[in-house]
Amino acid sequence: MLSPISWMKERGILIELTFIDADGESQTIQATPGESVMEAAIRNEVPGIEAACGGALACATCHAYVEEPWYSDVPEKTETEADMLEYGSHVDGRSRLTCQIEVTEALRGAVIRTPIEQG
């Protein structure tokens, strides 16, 4: 019997995301639709995503940069997320908290960059 992850991968249900760190090293992971990008990153041990609050929107240690064209496909930041990003390091116009981004088909193949350090 296949594990749930293997079953979804076999059927093309998993969404591939590529994380690139500040040194240019990349890691492609398989994410499950419905989980947060942060959950997928932590499960796959992506360097640079710390997630100190575990996704409770109480820190900015899951901060990352979502590249275009995928950035345009994620829902806009909430006011709370924007406020929390003020505590992040190296924040720019593509900055998001990965705990606030749900993995959907729109993110298939997305490139997400992690900052040189988390705030």
Image: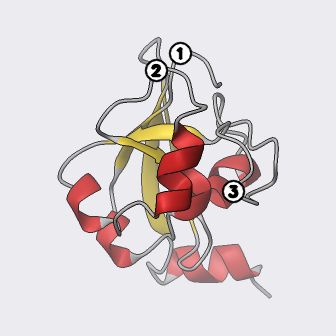
Q: Is residue 73 above or below residue 113?
A: below
- Few, some or many C-alpha atoms within 10 Å of disc 2 (few <14, some 14-19, many ≥20)? some
Residue flagged by tag 2: what amino acid is it? His
Q: Amino acid at mark 1?
A: Ile
Spatial separation of the CA atoms under disc 2 and disc 1: 8 Å
Q: Residue 48's spot in the image, x, y percent? A: 63, 28
Numbered disc in front, either 1 or 3? 3
Q: Is residue 19 above or below residue 104?
A: above
Tell me which residue sits at (64%, 58%) in the image. 40
**Does the residue at mark 2 contact the one at mark 1 (Cβ under 8 Å)?**
yes
| Residue 29 appearing in the image | no
Visible residue check, residue 101: yes
Per the image, label 3 sits on a secondary structure element best described as: loop
Circle 2 residue: 90
**Residue 18, image x and y in percent?**
43, 44
- Residue under circle 1? 116
User: What amino acid is labelled 3 in the image?
Assistant: Leu
Left or right of 75? Residue 51 is right
The image quadrant where one finds the N terminus is: bottom right
Tell me where residue 46 appears, x and y as whole percent.
65, 37
Asked if 21 appears above or below 79 in the picture, the reply is above
CA–CA distance in space, label 1 to label 3 = 21 Å
12 sits to left or right of 71: right
